[in-house]
Amino acid sequence: MELFTIKTESANLTDDQFFLLCAENKEIRFERDKNKNILIMAPTGGETGNSNLELGIDLGVWNRKKRLGYCFDSNTGFTLPNGAIKSADVAWMAKEKWERIPREERKKFAHVCPDFVIELLSESDNAKRAMMKMEEWMENGCQLGWLIDPNTRITHVYKPAAEPTMIPFEEVLDGENVLLGFELKIAEIIPD
């Protein structure tokens, strides 16, 4: 399924107006690109929804033990430095970084980029568009990203200013210096 884009040159919604549009239409998944065009995304199917939840649970359990930061689900929007408002299937941010954001701003689409994101390709996603989104995360301050592709059974690992590496589902993913001690084998979450 294709992404639906609404060109907004004439509307030019402010951040607050865009937040209100999203809040009043909770049944629709919105993002906004750096040119302020509104993107409407299809909801995921059951398999993808279950996998997203399992990924979030594993990250959440690790985070609860380590208490190093905060986890976010796919409904959380972040205003990136380039002006885009994006959400990841799963995101994480260091505790100090999140707590520096004023509480009122945290209630909306905070002006901050997560330190770690997971994007899981669903049947309605376009792989090339997802790769471009991962690059945008990195360009805006994300330190580590995993783009998980169930069709190829490969996870593309993104880091700033580096080409992505490809890790098969059977191998263990490492949170490296961003998520110290976090390891995950995607094959255990998304079986063959």
Image (spheres, helix red, strand yellow):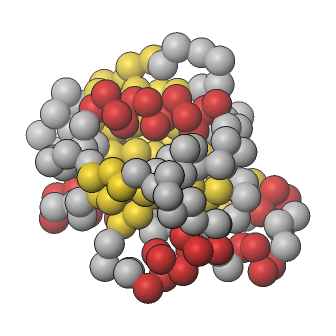
Q: Is residue 56 left or right of residue 121?
A: right
Q: Is residue 47 above or below residue 130?
A: below
Q: Which residue does the image show at 67% across and 42% down from the upper left? A: 82
Q: Is residue 158 visible?
A: yes
Q: Residue furthest bottom?
A: 24
In the depicted structure, whether residue 159 falls above or below residue 187? above
Asked whether residue 176 is in view, the answer is no
Compared to residue 58, the image places residue 103 above or below, namely below
Quadrant location, the C terminus:
top left
Residue 141 lies, in percent from the top left, at: 70, 38
Instruction: Tell me: 140 left or right of 154.
Output: right
Identify which residue, 162 or 179, lies in the foreground: 162
Q: Quadrant location of residue 27?
A: bottom left
Quarter of the view holding residue 161: top right
State the image quarter where residue 104 is shown.
bottom right
Q: Is residue 71 left or right of residue 118?
A: right
Relative image position of residue 102 (x, y in whole percent): 85, 73
Image coordinates of residue 2 in percent, x first then y, are 19, 45
| In-front residue for pair 120/55 | 120
The number of callouts visible is: 0
Image point 25% across, 37% down: which residue? 126
The image shows residue 156 at horizontal and vertical percentages of 40, 27
Outermost residue to the top: 163
Question: Which residue is located at x 45 percent, y 69 percent?
Answer: 75
